[in-house]
Every structure is written in C-alpha cells, then in structure tokens.
Amino acid sequence: ETGVTQTPRHLVMGMTNKKSLKCEQHLGHNAMYWYKQSAKKPLELMFVYSLEERVENNSVPSRFSPECPNSSHLFLHLHTLQPEDSALYLCASSQDLTGVSNEKLFFGSGTQLSVL
Amino acid sequence: GQSLEQPSEVTAVEGAIVQINCTYQTSGFYGLSWYQQHDGGAPTFLSYNALDGLEETGRFSSFLSRSDSYGYLLLQELQMKDSASYFCAVRDQGGKLIFGQGTELSVKP
C-alpha cells in the first residue's frame, strides 16, 4: 500500500464515451501527477499539480482533461479517445514539487485503459 | 531536453549479482533515482543519488558518476521476487521526474 489509490483498476471504453479516472492520496502531499505508461516506452509525464494549481501540461491532447479539486484528489476526464490512448495511467504524489523531497514519488497501481 | 538510456532486458539466476546501467543527457542535473515496478503494480521508490559514489540499502546499491553522466543499480543475492522492471529517472529544471524506458529483470531458478 503506497498511500495513493486509483480507481477503477481497469476500464474499457468506446471512442465516443466519456469516463473519468480518479486518484486519491492519503499522505498529506502537495504535488500530484498523471503519467501515461505504454508498453516498452518510458513513463510519460502528462500533468502536474502543485497545491491544486496546474503547473505542467506536457502537450497532452485536449481529449484528456485533468481536475484537481483539492490537494488529496486528482481526476483525469476522458472523452473521444483514440485506440492509441490505450495504456496504463498512473497517478503519483510527492511532498512538494521541487526540492529533495520531490525525488520520491508515491505511485498508485494505475488504471489499465483499453479504447475500442 | 532530457533522455535516459538503459537496457531493455536483463536475465540472471537466483543468488547472483546483476547491474543495471543508466546513462543520461540532461540540461541540468539534480540527481538520479531508481524505481521498481512489478507486473501489474505501482512503481516504488528504491534509491536516490545526488552525489558521486555508492549508496547501499540492503541487497540493493546505487552508484552515480556525474562526470560520466552514468549510474547503475546493483542487486545482490538475487531472489525470484526481484523479477520486475527497474526505471532510472532524473529531475528536470522544472522539478519534475523524467523516466527511462525501464529494464525488465528476469530472475531464473
């Protein structure tokens, strides 16, 4: 148990569906992240939030829309996805965005997304 | 920008020692981290090196040479449960971690 919980664990959706991924951290951290993990590829940073403010959007298509209502919760809203968006989506948190404490990320187990 | 290179696969036997290398190119360097990820699980933090040298934590050690832009993770007394993917990562100037593609370690009996 890492202290970061993601739901659902698995999700299958059609290209016209709208769904949301949820992440919750119980660690009192100030920074939260969304990463995409595709087979045989590095983890790709998608979004970063620090104190509920988005500080990074790594050229992610607008069909992915993040939301951070408070420092403990992070959502990724999905709509009109493409088959190539099928991947494992990982949420992570860290104490702060910068500084030594940032070196240690705490990850959730991810949502395995399949887009048909 | 940042890039990291590590082998895609490594195979070793139980009880052996294995070294997973990582070379990096960064516009600024703040330290090298290692993460372990079992199949279907969350990546978990293993170690962090900000300065040159060897850091030891039980059976795992991590080494950094900043002049060579190189580091490695050393796993000793391998166990079957060490079969997993291992990622090196560096922090960019904005303070965010950038990961390598991962090395899949298979430990055989």
Image (cartoon, rainbow, N blue to C red):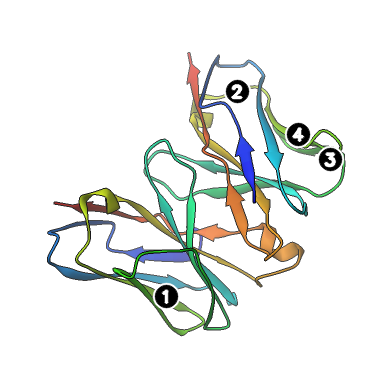
Question: Residue B70 has which mark?
Answer: 4
Three-letter code, disc 2 = Leu
Tell me the distance, in whole angstroms, between the alpha carbons under discs 2 and 4.
23 Å
Out of A69 and A62, give the one closest to the viewer. A62
Q: Are marks 3 and 2 in contact (CB under 8 Å)?
A: no
Earlier-in-chain disc, 3 versus 2: 3
- Looking at the rendered image, the disc whose residue lies closer to the viewer, 1 or 3, is 3
Which of discs 2 and 4 lies nearer the camera? The answer is 4
Q: CA distance from mark 4 to mark 3?
A: 6 Å
Q: x, y (%) of residue B43? A: 51, 48
Residue bearing the label numbered 3: B66
- Which amino acid lies under the numbered mark 4 shown in the image of this protein? Tyr
- Given the image, what chain letter belongs to the residue carrying mark 4? B
Query: In the rendered image, which residue does mark 1 sit on?
Result: A74
Q: Disc 2 vs disc 4: Cβ atoms closer than 8 Å?
A: no
Q: In terms of depth relative to the viewer, which is nearer, A24 or B94?
A: B94
Q: Quadrant of residue B74?
A: top right
**Residue under disc 1 on the same chain as residue under disc 4:** no
**Tag nearer the camera, 1 or 4:** 4
Q: Are marks 1 and 3 in contact (CB under 8 Å)?
A: no
Residue B78: percent from left, percent from top: 60, 23
**Label 2 crowd (10 A; few <14 / some 14-19 / many >=20):** many
